Amino acid sequence: MDAWAVTEPGPLTGEPLQPVRRPVPVPGADELLVRVRACGVCRTDLHVTEGDLPVRRPGVTPGHEVVGVVAGLGEAVHGFAPGDRVGVAWLRRTCGVCAYCARGAENLCPRSQYTGWDTDGGYAAYTTVPAAFAHPLPGGLDDVALAPLLCAGIIGYRALRRAALPPGGRLGLYGFGGSAHLCAQVALAEGARVHVVTRGAAARRLALELGAASARELSEAPPEPLDSAILFAPVGDLVPVALRALDRGGVLAIAGIHLSDIPPLHYERELFYEREVRSVTSNTRADAREFLTLAARHGIRATTHAYPLSRAPQALRDLEAGRFDGAAVLVNDPS
């Protein structure tokens, strides 16, 4: 089958993502074989490809926002049939027995594994997923529209909950890519007033079209104090900026898996008055179920830009350069 592999992590200018031919994977006893129809392009794929994240599997195939159909079943799998449409997300497997899993915090499992990092993902014709971590998908949306919901949407939803936004509160979003534009729709549907701070003019236009109260450049502050903020851009320099925009008792959630270094914080200016900083680590399957249900109920829609699978490196380059609003999605030839 055709696939892409990170042969030598590094800057995209060095072409670390290379086309390869591989056998169709064989699912394990508890796994599904999934024929990939669409795979979202996530910033985490960029971090894996450029080496911001340490190598877990040499030559890994990235991609963890997979929409596909079941093409094969392991002998221990029940509840799925060939042809079922399923989603494959970032969290691939957890141990199920540690203290974190036992208390419902499987996203913190020390033995967790991740699609497109520990195992081969969706930049390919086929991938596999443990059946217990495959997501049934809502109807009414096509494959391309669904793909970004499977990481960008889920992580944005968890970040929103970690930000502890009060009902009708004032939310600031720093960066406005694939995850933030879905998070904004959830917040708006729940009655929040949303302010966006981001570098791209197209992203600012999209924010206003979706209903944001304001959309400003990185050099500008939101027009009112914020109850909560979420940092989506992987830029540590924005942490003190976002903290200064918070009202007393406000919470900043940092949504990314990778962040550049945070500069020294000034206690009185940025942390006093019980402001908080919280990180976000992966997601639980419960987060995914809750978000997909909300997305169907509120009509959450990703703004998407489709690329054929053959142009995966270009999609990553465009993501890094901020050349599109919303999210990019790789589409497999249906043949």
Image: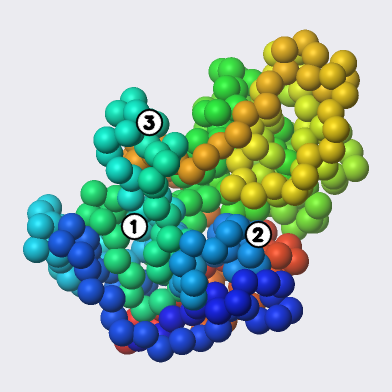
Q: Is residue 207 left or right of residue 101?
A: right
Which residue is the site of mark 3? 100
Which residue is the site of mark 1? 87
**Mark earlier in primary sequence (3, 2):** 2
Hey, what amino acid is under mark 1? Gly
Give how far apart the Cα atoms at labels 3 and 2 are. 26 Å
Hey, what amino acid is under mark 3? Tyr
Report the quarter where the C terminus lies.
bottom left
Q: Which of labels 2 and 1 is toward the front?
A: 2
Mark 2, secondary structure of its residue:
loop
Which residue is the site of mark 2? 52
Q: Which of the 4 image quadrants contains residue 275?
A: top right
Give how far apart the Cα atoms at labels 2 and 1 are. 26 Å
Q: Position of residue 119 (x, y in %)?
A: 40, 64
Whether residue 298 is visible to the viewer of this picture, yes or no, is no
Q: Which of labels 1 and 3 is toward the front?
A: 3
